[in-house]
Amino acid sequence: MSKPDYQATNLPLWDFLTILASEGVDFLLSGEEDKVTLSSFDYEKTTICLFFSANWCRPCQSFTPKLVQLYNMLRTMGKELEIVFISLDHDEDGFNAHFETMPWLTVPFDVNLHKKLRERFHVVRIPFLVPLNLDGQSVEEDLIGLIEDFGEDAFPFTKKRREELKAIDDSKRQGGKIDQLLARPGRDYVVASDGGKVLVSKLIGKTVSLYFGAHWCPPCRAFTAQLVEAYNQLLSSRGDCFEVVLVSSDRDQKEFDVNISGMPWLALPFEDRTRQDLCRIFNIKAIPALVLIGPDGKPISTNGKNIITLYGAKAFPFTQSSIEEIEESLRKEGDSLPTQIQDIKHQHVLKLDMAKSYVCNYCERQGKFWAFSCDACDYDLHPTCVEEAS
């Protein structure tokens, strides 16, 4: 097989071809079992990636459909990309079952050959994807993570491309443009619970909360109730200056529909990749989470959940100065209250305590902040419900 001198320009590709040649392999297989000769590739124009995977591997089963989607999309866009499957299955049946889900090429099943390739490319876990560049660019080491984070935008899978994408994320996060965060080419709207569409441009100039949550998550359902209360209070007292947009982590469209049906605010469409983009941009690792965006389009806080839980609608507009004002007001309120009281409704002395949330044992209404609590038993009293013994 005659080929250019890749050894001088691209060692990984040279090693790949050399290992195949050492095993007498000069072709790859397509899904139709056609043989594709190695000499038929335009190595200088085509980005070739080796995909190490196995049918028995659950992470591989999860990632392969994402890679299929990316491959088909990039090829449709005219990108010169080829993927070559390197099986780490234990037998040919496993290899065949896995390969039939793939639209790309494969090295023929040969345990010996696969072992050599695995050792050469230092594969310690799967799935593993490695590009064989010809242009000398430094490739991204965590290519699986890059693709899961950015999808087709990750192409051509170089470190330079990751740096460009991170710069775009930083610009969206700090750029002060809510439309850049929430809209994308082909979609300039968010959706309401009734299926209606609201233009993202209508949110410009408002304080916007990005609510990361899911219906399957019990803590999210508990926080949703708190957020609904604050939302309705602000709608009543402040008018149309505050909005919430759900960034769903629901598992399917049906679950998303159930989730948004109980919410008075807006949501990103379930099928839209912007949901994943925002999780990455704001480094969301757990739900529920609430990111607060100011009227200028810049983030106020990524800890909005804690702010709403502690202070509710009182904290609006959620700036540091508004939080400090609330805390100062609470401190003064606490200073004006006695440190302990003896209430006629309870046998023990009650001590002044700061509580995030509690239910008054006398009036049975929800309370926040200051309470008179019993050290001896689970008893809490609103300061306004106190009846001191004479």
Image (cartoon, helix red, strand yellow):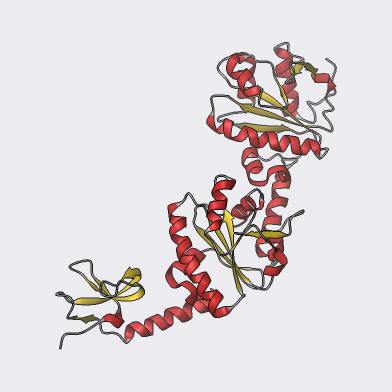
**Based on the displayed image, in which of its 4 quarters is residue 78 positioned?**
top right
* Residue 203 in which image quadrant: bottom right
Task: Determine whether 9 is above or below 330 in the image.
Answer: above
In the picture, the quarter occupied by the C terminus is bottom left
186 to 328, vertically: above or below: above
Q: Position of residue 62 (x, y in %)?
A: 58, 34
Q: Is residue 386 left or right of residue 280?
A: left
Of all residues, the one furthest to the front in this rendering is: 194
Indicate left or right for 146 with 17 as reference: left
Return the residue nearer the eye: 228 or 341.
228
Q: Is residue 339 left or right of residue 63?
A: left
| Residue at figure coordinates x 17%, y 77% from the top left | 349
Give the number of callouts.
0
Q: Nearer the viewer, residue 7 or 28?
A: 28
Residue 215 visible to an observer of this rendering:
yes
Q: In this view of the protein, which residue sits in the foreground, 202 or 292?
A: 202
